[in-house]
Amino acid sequence: MDKVITIAMPKGRIFEEAVELLRKADYRLPPEFDESRKLIIDAEEEGLRFILAKPMDVPTYVEHGVADIGIAGKDVLLEEERDVYELLDLKISACHLAVAGLPDTKLNDVAPKIATKYPNVAAAYFREQGEQVEIIKLNGSIELAPLIGLADRIVDIVSTGRTLKENGLVEYETITEVTSRLIVNPVSYRFIDSRINEMVSRLTRVVSDVK
């Protein structure tokens, strides 16, 4: 029997959109797949095993080989800088990384503070702009930082912009567009390349059909 391919996927929106893509690519996933609270789900007919993880952990699982394949947002890949191959832009869960803050405010001239859960991305961006900033890493409620005087700006994911607006913030600059990508462990790619390439081909056809 062929080796079971393990796929790490984040919970939430990316998971839901990725499952829809896989089904459109004629992968037979069990009916209970969508409702399950399990963290490891087997699709035995297809020889696939899925690990459901936090988005930031997906590239780590793939790099260390506990997952052969992963689906991760480009934001996570840029932040984590893991040793994985990026095989395909799945064009799902589109959003962008942006700099935001209170309206009509300038960056502090002395060590402006930037709050974000993407410290590496934020530091690289402001370095490219010639700005020397202090990065404050937060894990949630990033929008709160400018409101309580913790930071001059935030760097965060923006989808519709609704959360920024509801908190009285405005977007100043777009750092990069973000979609979810299919990634693979380099060793897995060498040893099970035919099955992985088949998945890439099947998903590519589905992605090409999506506007």
Image: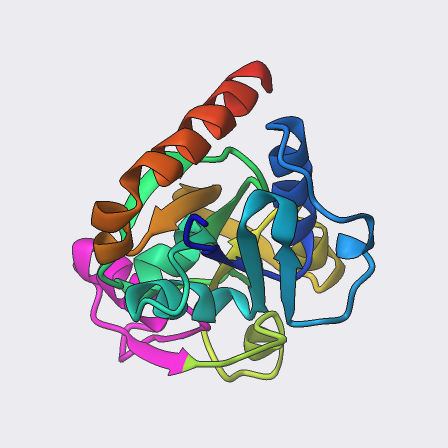
Question: In screen coordinates, is 88 left or right of 111?
Answer: right
- Judged left or right of residue 51, residue 137 is left
Please give the name of the residue rendered at 57% of the width and 51% of the height, measured from the top-left corner.
158
- The vertical placement of 26 against 65, above or below, is above
Which residue: 33% across, 39% down?
A: 87
**Relative vertical location of residue 174 with respect to residue 66 in this rendering, above or below:** above
Q: Hey, which quadrant is residue 166 in on the image?
A: bottom right
Query: From this viewpoint, is residue 20 visible?
Result: yes
| Image coordinates for residue 206, horizontal then vertical, percent | 56, 22
Give the image location of residue 120, x and y in percent: 29, 68
Q: Which residues are magenta?
A: 108-136
- Residue 34 seen in this snapshot: no
Quadrant holding the C terminus: top right
Q: Position of residue 9 (x, y in %)?
A: 54, 58
Residue situated in front as seen by the camera: 22 or 124? 22
Q: Is 132 positioned to the left or the right of 149 in the image?
A: left
Please tell me which residue lies in front, 137 or 17. Answer: 17
The relative height of residue 18 versus residue 111 in the rendered view (above or below) is: above
Which scheme is used to colour this image of the protein?
A: rainbow
Q: Residue at x 71, y 64 (%)?
A: 167
Decide whether residue 128 is among the magenta residues. yes
Instruction: Give how far across and how far down residue 170 sits, in percent.
Output: 58, 53
Q: Is residue 197 magenta?
A: no
Q: Residue at x 70, y 44 (%)?
A: 29
Number of numbered tags placed on the structure image = 0
Q: Residue furthest front?
A: 1
The one nearer the camera, 12 or 169, is 12
